[in-house]
Amino acid sequence: MIHAFVLSLGQLFDRPVLRVFAKSLLLTMALFALLGVGMWFALEGLGDVIGAWAGLSDENNVFADVATLLLFLLAWWLLFRAIAVAVVGIFADEIVAAVEAKHYPRAHAAARDVPLRRALAMGVGSATRTIVINLLLSPLYLMLLVTGVGTALAFFAVNAWLLGRDLGDMVAARHMPYGALAEWRRGTRWNRFALGTIGTGLFLVPVLNLAAPVLGAAMATHAFHRGRSE
């Protein structure tokens, strides 16, 4: 898997991969900008209601400004991985095709392009699955908080598992029918977990985390084809 990371890093500045990196990053930033604007208007209205109830004035919208900043930073920390991977999932076919064309030309020739509808469904499913599962497990995270490191380890492991599935599906969707994915997942669970572990680790590295979804998709391509050859 380390070799897959090195190969993926070396191809990051290839034009097709760089193009996906640029447009996926711009779309992710645009979504967060819309989220920030929506939060500001919602909190401004809430501040007006609270101010009227308490008989206070907040003409400069200090409450909305401060609360929006704090909530935006929290949302960025909690949601960046889910949204960034979902967005890359929409364009993942281009990354996978570029890696296959360079390293696995025979597989590339036999691959099927993933329809936009399916790519969108996979992206939305990825984000929904990540958010819902982490919300459902939040009581476990809180219980483990008393151990000091238990929460971080559990959160990391869960998200590595989820990310491994998402990245693997991006590649497998080009080479097998939808109905065969479940069986393929069962046979590759530990390989995908290793992939997700490295990918999740990349999200923890400042600056490099911006390229983590693209690097993850490229790494998944190497992992998929090397796994099949073995």
Image (cartoon, rainbow, N blue to C red):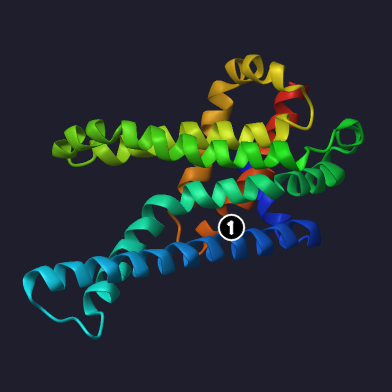
Is residue 192 at all visible to an observer of this figure?
yes
Residue at image coords 66%, 42%: 120
Residue 122 in the figure: left or right of residue 77: right
Is residue 195 at all visible to an observer of this figure?
no
Q: Which residue is mark 1?
A: 211
Q: On screen, 102 above or below 182?
A: below
Q: Amino acid at mark 1?
A: Ala
Q: Residues within 10 Å of mark 1 (few under 14, many from 20)?
A: some
The residue lying toward the viewer, choosing from 189 and 129, is 129
Q: Tell me which corner region of the image, top left, top right, bottom left or bottom right, holds residue 125.
A: top right
Measured as percent of width and height from the top left, residue 199 is found at 53, 44
Q: Tell me which corner region of the image, top left, top right, bottom left or bottom right, holds residue 69.
A: bottom left
Q: From the image, which quarter does the C terminus lie in?
A: top right
Q: On screen, 144 above or below 99?
A: above
Q: From the image, which quarter does the N terminus lie in?
A: top right
Residue at image coords 61%, 16%: 187
Residue at image coords 69%, 45%: 218
The residue lying toward the viewer, choosing from 197 and 132, is 132
Residue 199 in the figure: left or right of residue 106: left
User: How many marks do you count on the picture?
Assistant: 1
Q: On screen, 1 above or below 22?
A: above
Residue 119 in the figure: left or right of residue 30: right
Measured as percent of width and height from the top left, residue 105 is found at 89, 38
Measured as percent of width and height from the top left, residue 17 is found at 74, 56
The residue lying toward the viewer, choosing from 78 and 161, is 78
Measured as percent of width and height from the top left, residue 71 is found at 31, 62
Q: Tell me which corner region of the image, top left, top right, bottom left or bottom right, holds residue 104.
A: top right
Residue at image coords 81%, 48%: 98
